[in-house]
Image (spheres, rainbow, N blue to C red):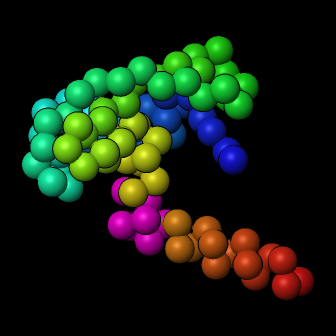
Amino acid sequence: MQTISLRAMRTQYPDAFPRILREMNQHHCSRCGGMMVGETCMDMLSDYADFQFQAQHCIQCGELIDPFILLNRMKAQNGDALKELTSSHRNRRK
């Protein structure tokens, strides 16, 4: 699993970062409309000093979002994830 720090995310994805912050501050779930509550999560496998990060958790449907989940969803919507999967699959064949 590849992880990056939040600072690195801000530098590598300057266009997406404001949208990520805006979505992290939503008080209603985008899936069901339920109430979102803040939650501190820990990534025990992280190599970075900031292994704790903030997430939002819906108390109605259980949706959990954090900056990394939102970034991956944005990439998938733009087709970047599909491009990465296709290129890695081609590289394995060679």
Residue 55 at least partly seen: yes
Residue that appears at 30% across and 33% down: 56
* Residue 41 relative to residue 83: left or right: left
Give the x, y percent position of residue 50: 58, 17
Does residue 68 lie above or below 30 as drawn? above
Q: Hey, which quadrant is residue 21 in on the image?
A: top left
Does residue 26 lie above or below 90 as drawn? above
Comparing 58 with 45, the one in front is 58
Give the x, y percent position of residue 87: 68, 75
Residue that appears at 60% across and 28% down: 43
In the rendered structure, which segment of residues is drawn in magenta?
74-80
* Residue 16 relative to residue 5: left or right: left
* Residue 69 relative to residue 22: left or right: right
Main structural element of the magenta stretch: helix, strand or loop? helix
Residue that appears at 72% across and 25% down: 47
Comparing 76 with 46, the one in front is 46
Give the x, y percent position of residue 65: 35, 41
Comparing 5 with 27, the one in front is 27
Q: Hey, which quadrant is residue 58 in on the image?
A: top left
Residue that appears at 14% across and 36% down: 35
* Residue 60 relative to residue 41: left or right: left
Please identify the residue farthest to the right as the structure is shown. Answer: 94
